[in-house]
Structure formats: C-alpha cells, structure tokens
C-alpha cells in the first residue's frame, strides 16, 4: 500500500528513498524549465505534498499536462529536501500514473476557488476534498479519539445503547417515529386509532433522543460507563446550533452526586481540548488563520482555567443586575436563553457550571433537591457559545421519581424498566451529555453546526 502524505511531511520516511504516494491533485503549475508541480493531497494531514514531474516522463504531454483539480494520481519517485519555500520535503517523480480523471474539469464542483459553506452543503459528497472540510474531519476524529482515551484511562466502559427505542428519554416528545406500517393504509383498532400491535415491534417506536436511560442501567452494574452515538431530535429548530441528528457523549457514574458530575465534566472537557491542541496543530493553525483567529487562544485559556460554579438562582440575579436589555425575559422559573448564557460566561470570563434549575423546566429524571423547587441539574456554559453540556444527578428514590413522572403526565408503565433500577439496589448516580458537534464548533470557530458533521440532517434536508 502507498505511504501517507502525513508520514512523508512529518519526516518519518528517509530522504532519497523511492516511494509511491497516492492522492488527489489540488493544483498543477507548469514551469518553463521543463517541470510541472503538482500539489497532491490524500487527506492524511492539512498540507499537500509537492510532486515535481519532469517533461521527460513518457506521459508528460499526453497526461501530466492534462491533469486538473480532483484527478486521482499515484506518484512514484525519490523524496528530497525541497528547494522551494512552503514545504520541507517534495518528491521528484519518476512516474505519475493517472488513476481517475475528472470529467469536464470546468464543472468540477469543488474547484480550488473559494466556495461558500452554503454552496458546499449542496455538494456534501465532494466537500471533504476542500481544506476546511478535511480539517473539520480530522479535528472531529481527534476529539472522538480523545474522548474514548479519556474514558478508557479512567476506567469507564463504552456501552452501545440502542438507536430504536420505545422510551422518550427526555420526555419532551421530540421523537422521530420508526414504523413499518403502510402510512397510506394504516391498520386501525375498533375505536379508530392506529393499531400499533401490527407494527414491527408491536408498539410505537422511535429514534432515540438520548442513550441516558439505557446507560443508567449499565451504570448501576458497572459503575463507570458512557455512550457515544447518534441521537435524534425532531425539533423544528433552524438555528446554527441545532441538528436533527447529532452525536452525543454521555458518561454516567455511580455513587456520585452533582458535584462529582461537574468535576468529571471539567476534567473531560480539558482533556479533549488539550489533546486536540497537541494532536492537530496543522488543522488548528488553519482554523486560526482562516475561520476564527481566537480559536487556539480560546482553547489554551479553557484548559488552564478552573470552572466557576453558580446556582441557577444566582445566575438569574446576575442577569437581573446586569442592566442589560435582553431579547428574552429573565425571571426565576424561566429557562436561560443563549443570550443569557453568553452574558454569564462573558461576565465571569471562564467556563461556568450553572446548577440547581427549577424543576418545572427540567426533565423528569433529575433529582429533586431538598427545597423541592429545584432539581440537581447542571449546564456547562463555554465562553462564547453557551451550553455545551447538560447533565444532572438522577432521581434515585422511586416514590419521588413516580411523583415527577405523574407531574409531567408521563406513563409510568412505559418507564417500568427504568423504575426497576430504583427498586433493586438504587444508588446516587449522575451523568451528563456533551453535544459532540457543539464541541467541534467551539474548538474550530465554525459558525454553522451543519458544517461540522459529514452529512447534516436538518428540517427539510436529508439528502446524500
Ligand atoms: O441537554 P440535553 O438535551 O441532555 C440530554 O440529552 C441528557 N440526556 C444528557 C445526559 O444527562 N446524559 O442534550 C445534551 C447536549 C446539549 O448540551 C447540547 O450540547 C447537545 O446535547 N444538543 C444538541 N446538539 C445539536 N443539535 C441539537 N438539536 C441538540 N440538542 C442538544
Ligand atoms: Mg440541555
């Protein structure tokens, strides 16, 4: 198999060795001195490798001079120290083999000119060829690996929770239905309702909104666990921070309260960003130069700061005393909006954990505090973007959980397996969910969440 451009440019291959590199042509430049310079990318790192192709190659006129952006090539030759500036190592090619031509180069959808991100979403199958999407993809991978590494090193087990479920984990009713029934000809019961007993699973089923309830069952057996998978929300949210399909990382720890949960969130986020800064210097330099000049300093500051913890009640006081005019009202009992969260982090100047929210605006599974007005919930707010983590200590008392299910008009029978955990060796436990795409946005400065996931799913868009 061919070597990667990354290993060559990192200097891991001895000079003067004859090697083969395979990739896609970014640009071709022909010099009068009898050479063509090809910039070739295989996506393994940010930089292209420069291939010097002499006009003595047998296919120089017939093929090399016909190469355009996007053509796939295999180049064989000696690695040498580069004379030109911009790269340390280049290849003097003895052979340039064309593996795949680009039909009609003038219609190649991702030519080297600058394209808008909106346009690139329409060619989502080819946008990974661009600098930005290559960089996003490598950063996404680096953060995913860092997450798994953190949990593995700290004794957590990765639990593969189901995608199809009958339970609404957030109790918010924002679920996509999964069904094999013929919608043009639905089976009906005697009283005219849809007969879901005829459906594939014998009952209504949905795409999961969160792996939390399932991962809690493993937490109360293996103590430290996490999920990392796709989750689905059928919310009509047309914002640059919402997707209908997004990935979430959800750790869950037993014998733990909200404070331990906040400790975990802080250690975890810092590990992610420290690891990214170390492993993807090339891509982060690109984001700092072209997308968001503050992204590297923001992460450096983040990993060095200690998180501030405040209660929801104090956060509301802070907002009320700010003298700011907000678009949305600030009042004890109302949820914090993005503008409020932004004010809080800017005012405090470092990541903030807001704790103990009013029970009526939070999910049924959060543990009721002694004041009986608030629950042991936390949101971690990152300077500049607001909520990236939502978490809580879970209600571990069956009688209180049942009251909360009733208060939110949820069917206790539908949660019977979840309630069982509170009947057989219940323990205090807590966890959180990190929105993976929001994390990538925060790290890179990419403004729109649709541009940090390979194939975005949002209202009206499920192409590719
Ligand atoms: O606050 P959320 O809804 O919490 C849960 O789902 C809990 N079950 C987590 C847990 O305690 N295990 O979502 C968690 C995070 C949010 O902070 C946000 O970063 C992200 O998921 N998120 C979304 N990201 C993209 N698009 C959406 N529609 C999102 N909704 C939530
Ligand atoms: Mg939330």
Image: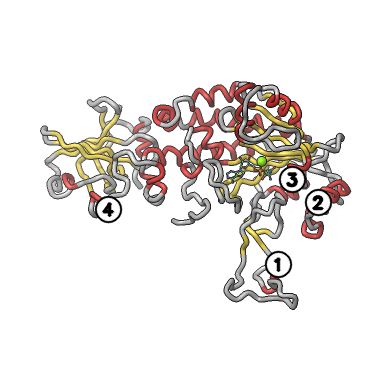
Q: Is mark 4 within 8 Å of ligand 1?
A: no
Q: Is 326 on the left-hand or right-hand side of 258?
A: left
Q: Give the label on residue 203, or none.
A: 1
Q: What is the spatial separation of the Cα atoms under label 2 and label 4, in whole angstroms?
A: 59 Å
Mark 3 and mark 4: span between their CA atoms?
53 Å
CA distance for labels 4 and 1:
50 Å
**Quarter of the C terminus within the rendering:** bottom left
Q: Choose the circle earlier in sequence order: 4 or 1.
A: 4
**Residue 31 at x, y = what percent?**
14, 34
Circle 1 sits in a helix, a strand or a loop, which is it? loop
Q: How many marks?
A: 4
Mark 2 and mark 4 residues within 8 Å of each other at the beta carbon: no
Q: Which residue is mark 3?
A: 363
Between disc 2 and disc 4, the foreground one is 2
Q: Earlier in the sequence, mark 3 or mark 1?
A: 1
Q: Earlier in the sequence, mark 2 or mark 4?
A: 4
Precedes in sequence: disc 2 or disc 1: 1
Name the residue located 30 percent from the left edge and 36 percent from the top edge.
49
Foreground: disc 3 or disc 4: 3
In this view, the residue in front, 264 or 119, is 119
Q: Which mark is residue 100?
A: 4
């Amino acid at each position: 198999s061919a070597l990667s451009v990354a290993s060559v440019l990192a200097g891991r291959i001895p000079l003067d060795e004859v090697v083969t590199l395979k990739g896609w042509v970014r640009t071709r430049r022909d010099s009068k001195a009898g050479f063509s310079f090809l910039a070739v990318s295989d996506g393994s790192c940010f930089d292209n490798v420069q291939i010097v192709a002499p006009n003595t190659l047998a296919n120089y006129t017939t093929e090399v001079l016909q190469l355009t952006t996007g053509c796939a090539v295999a180049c064989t030759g000696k690695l040498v120290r580069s004379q030109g500036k911009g790269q340390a190592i280049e290849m003097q090619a003895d052979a340039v083999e064309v593996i795949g031509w680009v039909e009609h180069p003038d219609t190649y959808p991702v030519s080297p000119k600058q394209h808008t991100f909106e346009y690139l979403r329409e060619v989502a199958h080819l946008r990974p060829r661009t600098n930005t999407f290559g960089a996003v993809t490598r950063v996404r991978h680096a953060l995913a690996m860092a997450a798994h590494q953190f949990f593995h090193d700290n004794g957590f087990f990765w639990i593969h929770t189901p995608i199809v479920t009958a339970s609404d984990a957030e109790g918010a009713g924002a679920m996509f239905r999964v069904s094999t029934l013929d919608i043009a000809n639905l089976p009906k019961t005697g009283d005219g309702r849809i007969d879901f007993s005829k459906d594939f699973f014998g009952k209504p089923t949905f795409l999961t909104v969160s792996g939390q309830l399932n991962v809690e069952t493993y937490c109360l057996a293996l103590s430290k666990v996490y999920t990392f998978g796709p989750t689905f929300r059928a919310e009509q949210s047309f914002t640059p921070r919402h997707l209908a399909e997004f990935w979430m990382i959800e750790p869950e720890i037993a014998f733990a309260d909200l404070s331990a949960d906040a400790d975990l969130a802080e250690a975890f986020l810092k590990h992610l960003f420290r690891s990214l800064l170390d492993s993807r210097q090339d891509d982060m330099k690109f984001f700092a130069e072209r997308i968001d000049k503050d992204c590297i300093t923001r992460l450096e500051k983040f990993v060095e700061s200690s998180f501030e913890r405040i209660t929801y009640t104090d956060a509301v006081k802070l907002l009320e005393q700010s003298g700011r005019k907000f678009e949305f009202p600030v009042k004890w009992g109302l949820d914090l909006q993005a503008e409020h969260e932004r004010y809080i982090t800017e005012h405090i100047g470092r990541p903030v954990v807001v704790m103990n929210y009013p029970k009526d605006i939070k999910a049924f599974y959060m543990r009721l505090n002694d004041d009986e007005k608030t629950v042991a919930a936390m949101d971690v707010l990152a300077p500049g973007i607001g909520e990236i983590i939502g978490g809580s200590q879970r209600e571990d008392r069956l009688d209180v959980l049942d009251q909360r299910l009733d208060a939110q008009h949820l069917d206790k029978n539908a949660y019977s397996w979840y309630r069982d955990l509170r009947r057989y060796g219940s323990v205090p436990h807590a966890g959180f969910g990190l929105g993976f795409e929001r994390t990538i946005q925060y790290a890179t400065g990419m403004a729109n969440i649709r541009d940090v996931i390979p194939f975005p799913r949002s209202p009206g868009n499920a192409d590719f």
